[in-house]
Amino acid sequence: MAEVGDVRKAFRHVGKPVPRVDAPAKVTGRTIYGDDLKLPRMLHVKLVHAPVAHARIKGIDASKALAVPGVEAVITAQDLPPHRYDPDNRTRVLLARDEVLFYGQPVAAVLARDPYTSAYARDLVEVQYEELPPVLDPLEALRPDAPLARGSVQALEEGEVGGHITVEGAEARKEEGPRNVASTITFKRGDVEQGFKEAAAVVEGTWRTPMAHQSYIEPHVIVADYDSTGRLSIWSSTQAPFHVRNEVAKTLGLPETRVRVISTEVGGGFGGKIYLYEALVGALAMTLQRPVKLTMSRKEDMLAATPAPNCIVQLKMGMKADGTLSALKARVIFDTGAFPGAPLLPGCLLIGGFYKCPNLEIEGLEVFTNKVSVGALRAPGAHNVAFALESALDMLARRLELDPMEVRLKNAVEKGDPLPSGQPYPAIGLKECLEAVAKSQLWQRRHEIRAHPNRGVGLAVGGWLGGLQPASATVTLNADGTVNALVGAADITGTNTAFAQIVAEVLNLPLEMVRVTTGDTDSAPYAGMSAGSKVTFTVGRAVKLAAEDAKEQILRIASQRLEAPPEELELVDGVVRVRGREDKQLTFRELGRWSTAFGGRYPPIVGRGAVAPRLQAPSFSAQAVEVEVDPNTGQVQVLSWVVAQDVGFAINPMAVEGQMQGGSTQGLGLALFEEMAYDEQGRLLNPNLLDYRLPTTADVPPIETIIVEVPSEDGPYGARIVGEPSIVPGPAAVANAVADAIGARVFQAPLTPEKILHALGKIKD
Amino acid sequence: MRPFSYFIPASLQEALAIFQREGEGGRPIAGGTDLVVQLKEGGHKFPYPRYLVSVRRLPELRRLEWVEGEGLRLGAAVTMAEIEASPIVRERYLALAEGARVVGSRQTANMATVGGNLCNAAPSADTAPPLLVLGAKARILGPRGERLLPLEEFFLGPGRTVLEHGEVLVEVLLPPPLPRSASAYRRHTPRQCMDIAVVGVAAFLALDEAGEKIAEARIALGAVAPTPIRAHRAEALLVGRPASPEVLGEAALMAREEASPISDVRGSAQFRRYLVGVMTEAVLEEALSRARGR
Ligand SMILES: Cc1cc2nc3c(=O)[nH]c(=O)nc-3n(C[C@H](O)[C@H](O)[C@H](O)COP(=O)(O)OP(=O)(O)OC[C@H]3O[C@@H](n4cnc5c(N)ncnc54)[C@H](O)[C@@H]3O)c2cc1C
């Protein structure tokens, strides 16, 4: 780390803590969000959400709703314009057609002059349902005699043609194996049975993590306008404007160039704001020839967005007496809800991807149930498997009387170690993170802490491989000598601030002279979605190249004007000068004028950067947690928390620390509180933030952050992915701390007082 | 939300007259922290009011005053923040201050009223168990005049009270505390704050002159029955007995039996019953140590 510190000294902007440029507007309430948008003649839509988990739609009577003054239309699946319908793809089922597959699924849309009228009239739409048995528990769903949550992929395709007979035929064919399977994955290495024979200790268990909601503070907002030239504009608080454009175009059968997506300020996403009802709202705008706005309430968002799946991990692990892992056997089951889309691949890669293990066997199953379709939540699938893996590792360490830190250091993956897929890791810093936590105050104090009755310390790690997607950017010089950067990536974590730092660094400008804008899909250079922690890592590189390109163009002109070779020129605060010659200089303002004014002699300065990164820069985090458990009430209070994360190079340490604290806080929430609870009919019991509990400030202790910097091979200034990894260890770290405190282990998150009292034997079923 | 009329009367008399004039379909509104949420969420399934009458600023409902020989007059529109900050409540009716203190956030506490808390009649209402053990009476005014009821008779079921159309809860009357007495309230919530009681327990204990035996005892439980309830049998086990840990433990076990909790998303019935036991014991101990300190 010493060397990295020296590197940091060489920079003026990157590596320095900078408050987000958009922070003042946000905290003073001046930021314009999607819900602030008003277009002339705009209608407000509310969706009719099915009150049953599985049913056939027998009929829809909208007459009462249509009679409400101010209601303009009630649209059902039959009324939508022709589009690409695909029963297997949640994004291609705009409204339920014949069958409702989950509680809350939209079956109709009510459009009115204001949102109150549409909400009121929505309750007057009468839908007749013939209820079907709901499939809710993924393990039950897999039984050969289980009812089907939905037609299988194939059956539905035939069903389109041949009706019910074909569906029954498909059911008969499937009678043998497990049912309701959406997809499977297997990874094998070595010989697990041999590995278990070599083990001095073997642990086995089933760990469960429930469905969880991303709980962004701003629910989904979409506005669509179909203008007289046949162009569809969509304003959406999406993390993925280009993805939305492409998907909407495909679904509605429009050329991509006819769809423009403007990503409005994202009031939180965490993976849940990729793509939801944009095509539906677009279709409604096309049908009614009027702008349409959908602002979802908290309840609607919890019923019908894309939360994270519940997951069951059956895990068996063996360890030799010296602490080396000898075998890992896992069955990972993700409940994907009514449509495919669960993070099965990352879950199965990561459960065998944190530690070296010569023998492993991982089987993954993605299972259909009658629940809302799932999506990504910050490092999707990772916290679920880490909960099992990191708990089991602690159990093994305890069994063999080994130190949990030592055991992890001994087995932690390093550069060159293979993932379960065989793909080797590039440079990574898992060990360095563990070492950083080992040196922390909290870890040093752990024996003292454990001397208190009912207090304990837990350790866990987690990581994320990160996404890759091409990205581009432009950097232009304005007439007034300031600089603009234009990108296509939605800024959710302060990435535009990091880009400003990069541009200011390359051009050696004060930060205030750089403005970064996220453009819409018509005007911005392409960027992939703001997901997979990769925005700074990929778009940041493009921004750096674009700034360097602009610099070269500036130097070329300056070299002519100042009659000096470019190598002898330097850029200082918006001035280009010949090194050592204060008299020979020109300003960015002059350059800006000459390249923009009437009769200007030079072409405008437009720097361009484009990259297609191929090498991931995975990031790991190690976390230690101190808890106190009340043995009478089962209540857990988290007293302190340390998070170390390898970020390669922290371009903006303040933003990086914010990410580490935010991820840790979400990990704490998943550990202790968060759970979407369903009844036996598949109805969501807590579609609100009262009973779906997020941690409050009173529940979160001060979180100490330790930035670890093992440079990536490919990222800007050695930066690697940052956003996601810090959420991963939380549930396991807390469970390990609770086990340390009370000597009892809870296998099911969240660790509610009730479950802890069960584990302590104080209450029984 | 649907359209409704909104009245802001200047006096209680005027408020009552509005209910008379406008007829069925009206409701009082105080801080609105329960009602507005219900209006927004309920759609047409909620018995939607045609009109609301604001009682928040009615002088008769805003009193918080100590009357020598009579006790405390606590107006229905006094807010949680005001209750918590009141020196007289803190000194003489500590359980009530403890109940008011945990309601929602700062913002909630500045709007939420004690009358709204009682009239909303949630089994988990945090001021109900304290007021029950403090011997509160409810003063109600309506078209048929005045009624004065022990608070125990006020609640009928979840969301239901004895109030009829046009009736307003004016104030709650608390008798002066007995010598050598004290009260306490605690609730269990998964989070540290901003949560609804899974179980709430209030206790009031008065000691005899020697400070050894329990002269009077009251225990009230929240969120474990269709309404906030008194645990009369547990109380009976305490009166006249020595104030010992064993005796308090016996009463706690009895309180467990008196609870009739349901299972819901906030906790199972058996978990709630278990909590009634451990929490009643803890709250009785707290009240006892406070009473001894007097
Ligand atoms: C964020 C949040 C957190 C909360 N946390 C808690 C908590 O921790 N504990 C808790 O117990 N509650 C909690 N609540 C619920 C609520 O704040 C309390 O019940 C509050 O005391 C209600 O008072 P109010 O003045 O807002 O009542 P309102 O909402 O105005 O009225 C509630 C009901 O009482 C009726 N009413 C009001 N005043 C009178 C009167 N004088 N006479 C006759 N009828 C009347 C109304 O018609 C309505 O039916 C919370 C609410 C929110 C929004």
Image (tube, coloured by chain):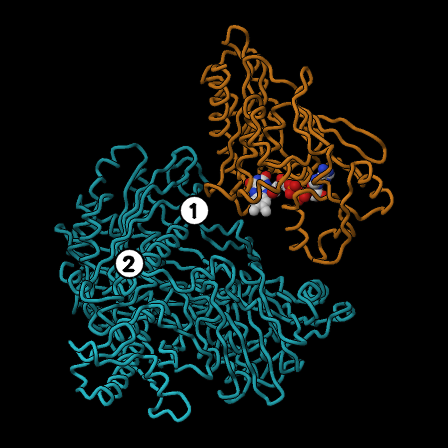
Chain colours: A cyan, B orange
Per the image, label 1 sits on a secondary structure element best described as helix
- Is B246 or B285 nearer to us in this picture? B285
Examine the rendering and report whether any part of residue B262 can be seen: no
Per the image, label 2 sits on a secondary structure element best described as strand
Count of number-bearing discs: 2
Q: CA distance from mark 1 to mark 2?
A: 24 Å
The amino acid marked with disc number 1 is: Thr
Instruction: Give x and y (percent) for residue A159.
Output: 56, 81
CB of mark 2 near ligand 1 (< 8 Å): no
Tag 1: Cα neighbours inside 10 Å, few (<14), some, or many (≥20)? few
The residue singled out by tag 2 in the image is A462
Q: Is residue B147 left or right of residue A165?
A: right
What residue is at 34 percent from the left and 91 percent from the top? A603
Instruction: Identify the image quadrant of residue B183.
Output: top right
The amino acid marked with disc number 2 is: Gly
- Is A141 or A253 nearer to us in this picture? A253
Examine the rendering and report whether any part of residue A297 can be seen: yes
Looking at the image, is A434 positioned above or below residue A636?
below
In which quadrant of this rendering is ligand 1 seen? top right
What residue is at 45 percent from the left and 61 percent from the top? A138
> Which of the numbered marks, if any, corresponds to residue A697?
1
Chain letter of mark 2 equals: A
> Which of the numbered marks, if any, corresponds to residue B24?
none
Instruction: Give x and y (percent) for residue A432.
Output: 18, 57
Tag 2: Cα neighbours inside 10 Å, few (<14), some, or many (≥20)? many
| Quadrant including the N terminus of chain A | bottom left
Q: Nearer the viewer, mark 1 or mark 2?
A: 1
Looking at the image, is A584 positioned above or below residue B271?
below
